[in-house]
Amino acid sequence: MDYDYKLKCSNKRVKVEDVYEFEGCKVGRGTYGHVYKAKPKAGTEEKDDEAKEYALKLIEGAGISMSACREIALLRELKHPNVITLNKVFLSHADRKVWLLLNFSEHDLWHIIKFHRNAKATSKPVDVAKGMVKSLLYQILDGIHYLHANWVLHRDLKPANILVMGEGPERGRAKVADMGFARLFNNPLKSLADMDPVVVTFWYRAPELLLGARHYTKAIDIWAIGCIFAELLTSEPIFHCRQEDIKTSNPYHHDQLDRIFNVMGYPQERDWEDIRKMPEFQALQKDFTKNNYVGSSLGKYMDKHKIKSDTKAFQLLQRLLTMDPNKRLTSSKAMEDPYFQEDPKPCADVFEGGPIPYPRREFLSDEDNEDKSSSKSATGGANSTHGPPVKRGRVVPPSTSSGTMNNYQKHHHQMTSMGMHSKSGSNQYTFN
């Protein structure tokens, strides 16, 4: 490239440090890089937006990784209230760094669940809206329905990748984040399993993935949502496996399957007809004996956590965590489930106008250990310590997501701030 032209372009290029203040405001760190809480500087073009807070996600490494390319390409096309918003991309040619400017989120489900788990351990009540879990689940499903309707698989759903907005115009809004592992699946050039043999973070990985499915579907995202739902109800990861995630291209994992069977019971061929077609079926037969799991069932597991099998919450959970991916609910069908039709109805502000009991994000120093940055960060962009690390056309907006919640739909695109929704009742509620 002509040097003078290169210099001219460099002088015209907007530098992120000239527009936003973020020094000393790191809120997340992981294998991807760092995330900072940022505000527009006074005297810049963004001066009218000085009160707004953003998340600046710095992609580590020299140049743009494939993961960053996928995330940028998808987020530039996607626009939905329950999907994280990409505002700008800054390229720093001097040090070959990439910055993503996203909406800042004060909370995420990893921190929220951890807060409730600690409260349960100390018998400390937490005052939250009674319908909070229902609202969170409905919004997650709505965001994933939008992605699936646009032929996008997320492929890395977990609590750390579900953000929850704090005070502001989108108060209490849940947002699906971290699209670095997402893929278009409408017309792949070859099997997704060939391109990425191991997907989805360990504890949220569907059984068909663990058995080596060659042509997995959007049902893998639904299984992960079921895992998140169970975790919201119990404050414990339902398929927690102590064995470390194996960094290999082989998707089969004995200990994770064992954990699933201990909770769900051994899969019967009459319930999952295609299980014999799974590439790792012979390994399954060799390593497992169904008699070892005779007393295991989802009902018994949830009953220990005081979730009864006759409740609509359990019945929806059971449909989300169906072993056979062909029988697993779709996102649109899940949104029509009777669970969302009984009071309290889902709200766009999951806090329902009440106080937010969760602490705000802390700023991290370079000396802070990784545990303090265990969330995906304010943008859901780092590997979380909540579970083992991940192995790592044009999008057209679909029609309005199906669903029957008038209260939710009425406010879905116009929620402003605290007090927009009438409280459906709050209690000393600890997600169980």
Image (cartoon, rainbow, N blue to C red):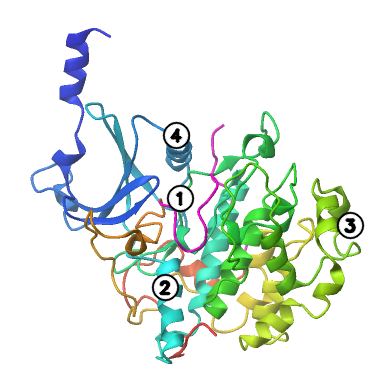
> Do the residues under discs 2 and 3 have CB atoms within 8 angstroms?
no
Relative to 406, does residue 130 appear above or below in the rendering? below
The numbered mark at residue 112 is 2
Label 2, label 4: how many angstroms apart (C-alpha)?
30 Å
Q: Is residue 38 left or right of residue 185?
A: left
Q: Is residue 391 magenta?
A: yes
Q: Quadrant of residue 224?
A: bottom right
In depth, the one of 97 and 176 nearer the eye is 97
User: What amino acid does circle 4 point to?
Assistant: Cys
Label 4 sits on a secondary structure element that is helix
* Residue position marked by numbered label 1 in the rendering: 178
Instruction: Determine the CA span between mark 2 and mark 3.
Output: 38 Å
**In the picture, which quadrant includes the N terminus?**
top left
Q: Which residue is mark 3?
A: 273
Q: In the drawing, does residue 138 fall left or right of residue 348?
A: right
Indicate which disc, 2 or 3, sits on the residue closer to the N terminus: 2
Label 1 and label 2: CA atoms lie apart by: 18 Å
Residue at 57% x, 31% y: name it: 393
Query: Which portion, as a residue range, is magenta?
Result: 382-403
Residue 296 drawn at (x, y percent): 77, 78
Lower position in the chain sequence, tag 4 or tag 3: 4
**Marker disc for residue 69:** 4
Alpha-carbon neighbours of circle 4 within 10 Å: few (<14), some, or many (≥20)? Answer: few
Q: Say which element carries label 3.
A: helix
Instruction: From the top left corner, tell me how far across and down residue 25 is, in percent.
Output: 20, 56
Query: Sequence-wise, which precedes: disc 1 or disc 2?
Result: 2
Of mark 2 and mark 4, the one earlier in the sequence is 4
